[in-house]
Image (tube, rainbow, N blue to C red):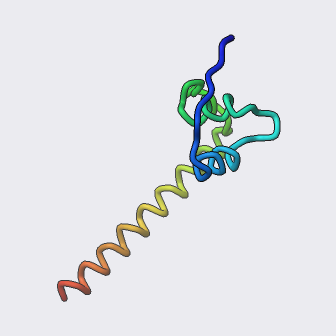
Amino acid sequence: MSSKNITLKEEAYESLKAHKRDDESFSDVVLRLSGKNKDIWKGFGMLSDEEADALRGHVEDVRDQIDEDFTERRDELFRQ
């Protein structure tokens, strides 16, 4: 496999280094972060049905709370 040399600003290097896992090369980091090796199905099926239902319920609760907060703030703002 061929390789290329690139120049990075110190800030870019530090960012890559912060994302680098112990078992990865910098090439691996770039490929992982760029989505080159992204498997959209990787996490599929990780949760049991019960865990998925609990997560779904939690998401719905959070959405309901956000809706309530938004309505309350809107009403306060427009004094309805």
Q: Horizontal and vertical percent for residue 71?
A: 29, 74
Q: Residue at x 68, y 29 (%)?
A: 28
Q: Nearer the viewer, residue 9 or 18?
A: 9
Q: Horizontal and vertical percent for residue 67?
A: 35, 67
Q: Which residue is farthest right?
A: 22
Q: Nearer the viewer, residue 65 or 8?
A: 8
Could you tell me which quadrant the C terminus lies in? Answer: bottom left
Q: Residue at x 59, y 53 (%)?
A: 11
Q: Horizontal and vertical percent for residue 40?
A: 54, 28
Q: Nearer the viewer, residue 17 or 64?
A: 17
Q: Horizontal and vertical percent for residue 77?
A: 23, 85
Could you tell me which quadrant the N terminus lies in? Answer: top right
Count of marks placed on residues: 0
Position above or below: 16 against 41: below
- Figure quadrant of residue 58: bottom right
Position above or below: 11 against 43: below
